[in-house]
């Protein structure tokens, strides 16, 4: 391994956040994220608008990342970028930018799988955060993903369970929409859940074989339940909002924890590392801590800024690939359905 400091510029543009980061080896010097507010009024990400916003944001975001890290572009050793999965129009912006910048600077280009990056974000060196040891189970839960991955080493990963329809974050956001909450609704449902009774209302858990998930039926169950209650009492939502949120959260966390219990039993692996926007949820955090006492799990939750979509996680994968000289060809293409 080289004793030289390796500086990597990383770019993430797979969904609705434009992000650029500078890493020095496995340490983050800057991690700039430009959120796109435009989608709020539509209650979900509009791909064409996301792509246009990335085009506007990418140059200032990269500029800011370099400035904050106090690094000149000539000092960079490589450029890492998200190749996929994600929205094609969004991925193309980051991919084209990274390609041309690397070509212009005559430095290596490194393509990164976004789903691997959510998991390998745990290997960013950060004070107060422990890194998992191999093998471990990675669970990525966000607005776009719900996956359990068996991780044997940095680049030897196997998806052992994933959603067959909606992602867990979508279950939160769609339930929130039914309740008249803003987008994204996850944080507000979480806040209200902590003030309500989780057993006030019962929602049946979907029955999905093995380690896969399904959340679309759950959202429909919430919809029918609310429609029925509102018919009898038009003020039902306002009068019971905290209890409804607590009951929704209780059911969703139950689904996630049940699958983790099965996964640990099937694999014999009891180290669990979570990532993705939903890992900010107070209920999942508490349930994982409980699992440490009840089931002997060791659990890892990364620093918040590395759980939601961000370029620092792309940068750590870039660094690990740099050490193996695993570079991309300049004709590499974005891939919206890239698999782990
Ligand atoms: O990782 P992320 O920022 O973006 C992607 O979807 O890739 O995740 C956003 C998702 C949204 O669905 C949002 O509602 C959810 O994460 N979320 C939460 C919480 N904070 C964010 N869901 C439940 N509880 C939270 N505290
Ligand atoms: Zn993501």
Image (cartoon, grey):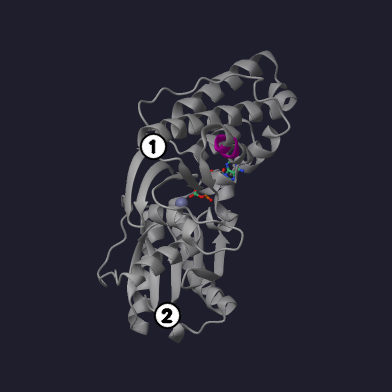
Q: Is residue 216 visible?
A: yes
Q: Which residue is mark 2?
A: 3
Q: Which residue is mark 1?
A: 268
Residue in the picture at 56% in, 54% down: 38
- Relative to 183, does residue 164 appear above or below in the rendering? above
Pointer 1 residue Cβ closer than 8 Å to ligand 2? no
By secondary structure, the bulk of the magenta-drawn segment is best described as helix
- Relative to 145, does residue 332 appear above or below in the rendering? below
Residue in the picture at 54% in, 56% down: 130
The spot of residue 297 in percent (x, y) is 51, 39
The spot of residue 9 in percent (x, y) is 45, 73
- State the SS at label 2: loop
Closest to the observer: 262 or 104? 262
- State the SS at label 1: loop
The spot of residue 86 in percent (x, y) is 39, 52
- Relative to 19, does residue 179 appear above or below in the rendering? above
Residue in the picture at 35% in, 76% down: 100
Closest to the observer: 108 or 151? 151
């Amino acid at each position: 391994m080289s004793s030289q400091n390796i500086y990597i510029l990383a770019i993430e543009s797979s969904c609705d956040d434009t992000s650029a980061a500078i890493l020095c080896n496995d340490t983050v010097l800057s991690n700039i994220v430009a959120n796109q507010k435009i989608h709020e009024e539509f209650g979900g990400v509009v791909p064409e608008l996301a792509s246009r916003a990335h085009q506007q944001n990418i140059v200032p975001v990269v500029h800011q990342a370099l400035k904050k890290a106090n690094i000149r572009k000539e000092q960079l050793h490589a450029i890492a970028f998200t190749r996929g999965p994600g929205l094609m129009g969004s991925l193309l912006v980051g991919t084209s930018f990274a390609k041309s910048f690397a070509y212009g600077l005559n430095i290596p280009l490194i393509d990164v799988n976004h789903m691997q990056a959510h998991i390998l974000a745990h290997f960013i060196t950060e004070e107060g955060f422990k890194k998992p040891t191999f093998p471990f189970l990675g669970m990525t839960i966000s607005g776009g993903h719900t996956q359990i991955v068996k991780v044997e080493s940095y680049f030897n990963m196997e998806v052992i369970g994933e959603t067959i329809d909606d992602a867990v974050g979508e279950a939160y956001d769609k339930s929130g929409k039914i309740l008249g909450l803003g987008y994204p609704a996850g944080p507000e449902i979480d806040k209200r859940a902590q003030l309500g009774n989780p057993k006030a209302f019962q929602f049946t858990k979907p029955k999905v074989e093995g380690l896969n998930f399904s959340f679309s039926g759950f959202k429909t169950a919430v919809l029918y339940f609310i429609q029925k209650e509102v018919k009898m009492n038009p003020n039902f939502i306002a009068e019971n909002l905290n209890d409804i949120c607590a009951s929704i959260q209780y059911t969703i966390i139950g689904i996630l924890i049940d699958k983790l219990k099965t996964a640990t039993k099937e694999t014999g692996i009891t180290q669990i590392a979570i990532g993705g926007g939903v890992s900010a949820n107070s209920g999942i955090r508490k349930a994982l801590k409980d699992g440490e006492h009840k089931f002997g799990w060791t659990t890892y939750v990364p620093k918040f800024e590395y759980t939601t979509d961000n370029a620092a996680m792309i940068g750590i994968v870039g660094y690990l690939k740099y050490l193996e000289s695993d570079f991309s060809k300049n004709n590499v293409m974005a891939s919206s359905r890239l698999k782990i």
